[in-house]
Image (cartoon, grey):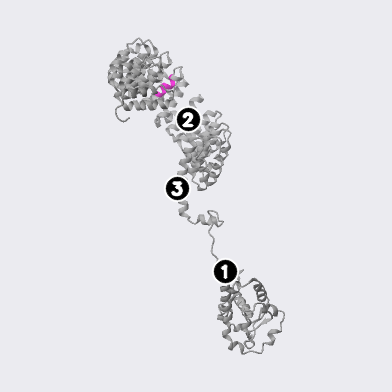
Amino acid sequence: MPGTPDTAEVAELVERLKSKNEAVQEETVRKLIQIGEPAVPVLLDAMEARAYQVRSCTAQALGEIRDSRAVEPLVQALGDTSVNVQRAASDALAKLGDCATGALMRCLDSTDSLARKWAAEALGKIGDESVVESLIERLKERNVEVQKSIVVALGELRVKRAITPLIGFLDHENVELARSAAESLGRIGSAKAVAPLLKALESASLDVRRSAADALVAVGKASIPALIGALASSDYVVRRWSAEALGRLHDLRAGDALMKALRDENVRVQRYAAIALGQIGEVRAIPKLLPYLRHESKDLRSAAVEALRAIGSGRARGPLTASLKDSDWVVRLNAAKALGELGAAEAKTDLLKLLGDPEWSVTLHAVRALGAIGDGIVADRLASLAKHDRPHIRAAVAEALGRIGVARHYSTVHALRNDDDARVRDAVTSALSRLDTLVAEEQRRSPGDNLASRRGRGRGSEPRQRVPPSVAREPNPTARRLDDRGESATARKDSTAVLEKKRGRTGGTVTGSAAVTTSEIRSSKKAVKSAVTTEKPAAKPAAKAVAKPVVKKAPVKNAPVKKAPAKKAPAKKAPAKKAPAKKAPAKKAPAKKAPAKKAPAKKAPAKKAAAKKTAK
């Protein structure tokens, strides 16, 4: 808040603490903390408010401001009728630190057991070792809750001279007190407590046994020899907790003892020994673990799968793939996780079958495994689960598709971006960031793909090959043959037919073809091209006229006489009307000199073609 607010403004903020809306309360506390010391007088008065939420929030603000004037009001609040206020006051005093130590020590002599309990906890959090002796003396407290708080405080202080007093509480009849003592000994972490903690593994209370095992793990490697020895205990409960603790310590020194424990007479001991072998990464245990994949106990089969997954050896891929068909869903789930972590691509077919497993959690881990080892075909199957009713599976599908990285499934993932579940939306964001990069790279590599798709080609198809025009015009390019002039037989036939049309010949036998020069053939090819652009009614008779003539070789002397009347060439309908009159060419045969004198008349077709192009 800008400037220094007056008392009225602070009082107004305190009034807002009465709101039952936690967001409003948090925002108001934040503003009061920003004001700092000027707000302390008003906050001290607020500790007497009737509404417990006002007192609780006020204690929180005073703890953050850390003003020593708040010590006595906060100590008094340790005996408040509201547990929330008691806890807030204790935490605030712990934050005030050394300035609150004296008042808290005096509070330990209070007649209010609640005040003594919270005062002991606050002293433990402050961390002042000068109070250790006073706390140890007060372990004789009659109130169990106060004793428990003192035990916890000694554990927070981590002072070794508190080990012996704490050991005495491990076999206490009060389970909570014994459990707290084990936890405190674990925090101190001394090897001196190992033997008593191993003894605590025999406790009738599960909570005490668990806390003792946790404490042995917290002690660290100093407890390993004792735990290895405990695997030979006559009590299977001790053997079971010892095996678990050894696995959590991740020390290969326990390998031999744990492999021996695989043959324990108790199935639970066998189970935790198998899990521990996986946790320490004992590769030598793989051959010993494989038979347990077919054990009659589903718990032991599951433990074997978990151990093989943790060891991470490819030698177990085949047996683990077979476990995907196990009757127990936990075994199938662990097998799917293991194969995914091992990258067992050969298990894709069996993993795909689990996508329809009746247990949705098995399907979930199958999707994750396929995402780790899948390809395009797997991605297609996973995309079909994008609308699954379970948000966990939808999120896993998005993650898997993003991890496999198939660009064609971008739209499938993108469709989930507005999913109702936050986990799905987060997974989609991560997947799209990867797919966006893949799509951009693909477009850079194949810039013509978009154009190709508009032309009817799909992505990934081979580009069209350009066919040479000469080959495209011939129905059978392999049959093309060249004569001694270097011209193809097909081209020569077409050229001769065009020359016949120019001469007015629509049928009969053509002779003297050997006398046709190459230049004439080339000019005739141009005429053929220009003839394509002519009107359709005239093109049909010309096509028929070209198809009928049969070219025969004849002596040069009988060379055909070119058509004399070049002026009649523009008349398109004239050849069609005279086509039946076969004698017409015979009447004009005597004029043999016409071709030599009227040679320039060959340009008529070119003029005609030019005129037609202009008209078009």
Q: Position of residue 284 (x, y in %)?
A: 45, 35
Residue 437, numbered circle? 3
**Are there few (<14), some (14-19), or many (20+) residues within 10 Å of tag 3?**
few
CA gap between label 1 and label 2 equals 74 Å
* Discs 1/3, front: 3
Q: Amino acid at mark 2?
A: Ala
Q: Quadrant of residue 511?
A: bottom right
Predominant secondary structure in magenta?
A: helix
Instruction: Quarter of the image for the N terminus: give it.
Output: top left
Residues marked 1 and 2 touching at CB (< 8 Å) = no
The residue lying toward the viewer, choosing from 436 and 572, is 572
* Label 2 sits on residue: 274
Q: Amino acid at mark 3?
A: Thr
Please tell me which residue is depicted at 33% across the width and 25% down the height of the picture: 64
* Label 1 sits on residue: 471
> In screen coordinates, is 487 left or right of 102?
right
Please tell me which residue is depicted at 54% across the width and 68% down the height of the picture: 468
Local SS, label 2: helix
